[in-house]
Amino acid sequence: MASIEQLLLQADLADSPSAKLDAELLLAAALGKSRSYLRTWPEREVEAACAEQFAAHLTRRRNGEPVAYILGRQGFWSLDLEVASHTLIPRPDTELLVETALALLPASPAALLDLGTGTGAIALALASERPLWHVSGVDRVEAAVALAEANRARLQLANSRFAASHWFSALAGQRFDLIVSNPPYIAAGDPHLSQGDVRFEPSSALVAGVDGLDDLRAIIQQAPEYLQPAGWLLLEHGFDQAEAVRELLSAQGFVTVESRRDLGGHQRISLGQWPL
C-alpha cells in the first residue's frame, strides 16, 4: 500500500492550473478526511479501495472535468454547497456581489432577489449573513431550483426561498430592495468556451448572444418594474464589459452607476440605483 505522501507525489495533473490543490481535494474526498489530515499524517498508508477511488478521480480530472463536479460540492463564501453539472460552479470572484450587497443595505428587514440562482450560492450567502433579510432565488432550470432548495434545507436558512422563473417571468407584482445576478455573459463565439472547466458547464449558464450582453440587457430593461424606489441592481459581467453595462444602466435611468474590481483587478461587477 502507498502512503498519503506517495500518492500525492505520484498524482499527475500537470495540465491543471491548480494541480497540487486538486490532488489534495480528490485524495481527501476518497479518504473521507480533510486536507489538514493529509498534511498531519502524510505517512499513513491508504487502503486499496480508497487508492482506487483516488485514481478514478484523477482520471476524470485529467480528462478536464472540474473538481467540483467530481466531488459534487464547492465552497462559496462561508458555505459548503452541493453542485451538479446542470449548474454553474460558484467562483470566488462572484463573492464580490455578496460583499457589495452586504455593504449597500443595512441589516434591517429587506427583500432581495437573486436572478439565475443556480446552486443558490449568492442567495444563501446573503441569507446566512443577514437573518432579517428575506432572500428569493429564481432559475429557469427546474433541476437548479431543486438543488438550491436542497442546499437551503441542509444549511437551515429559513429566510430564503427558491422558485422557477425565467428572469422575472413568475414575479409579477413583487418588488425588491436589491436585485443581484450573475447571468450568462459570454459571447457565443468566445474561444474560452472550449477551454478548461468551462467545457463541462452548461452553455445556458454561460452564453448570452453574439456579444454576451443579451441577458444583461434583458435584466436591466425589466428590473425597474421589480425594484423599490432607491432599490439597487447588482450585476456580474465579463472583465471587458463594464463600460457597456454602465452605459446600459445609465440609459435605462439608473443613477449612482459604477463598477467594482474583483480579486484579479478586473471590473467584474456593475451596479446602479433606481431613483426615488
Image: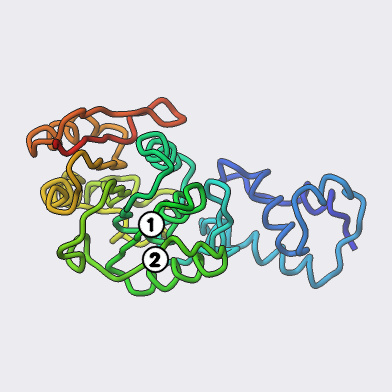
Q: Nearer the viewer, residue 271 or 227?
A: 227
Marks 1 and 2, how far apart at CA: 8 Å
**At 40% across and 52% down in the image, what residue appears?**
133
Snapshot quadrant of residue 247: top left
Quarter of the image with the C terminus in it: top left
Task: Provide the residue designation for mark 1.
Answer: 134
**Left or right, residue 174 beside residue 94:** left
Mark 1 and mark 2 in contact? Answer it, CB < 8 Å.
yes
The quadrant of the picture occupied by the N terminus is bottom right
Q: Which mark is residue 80?
A: none
Mark in the foreground, 1 or 2: 1
Q: Which residue is mark 2?
A: 161
Report whether 166 appears left or right of 135: left
Identity of the residue drawn at 27% across and 45% down:
190
How many discs mark residues in the rendered view? Answer: 2
Does any portion of residue 62 appear in the rendered image? Answer: no
- Mark 1 burial class by Cα count in 10 Å: few <14, some 14-19, many 20+: some
Which one is in front, 232 or 196?
232
- Compare residues 252 and 202 and report the one nearer the observer: 252
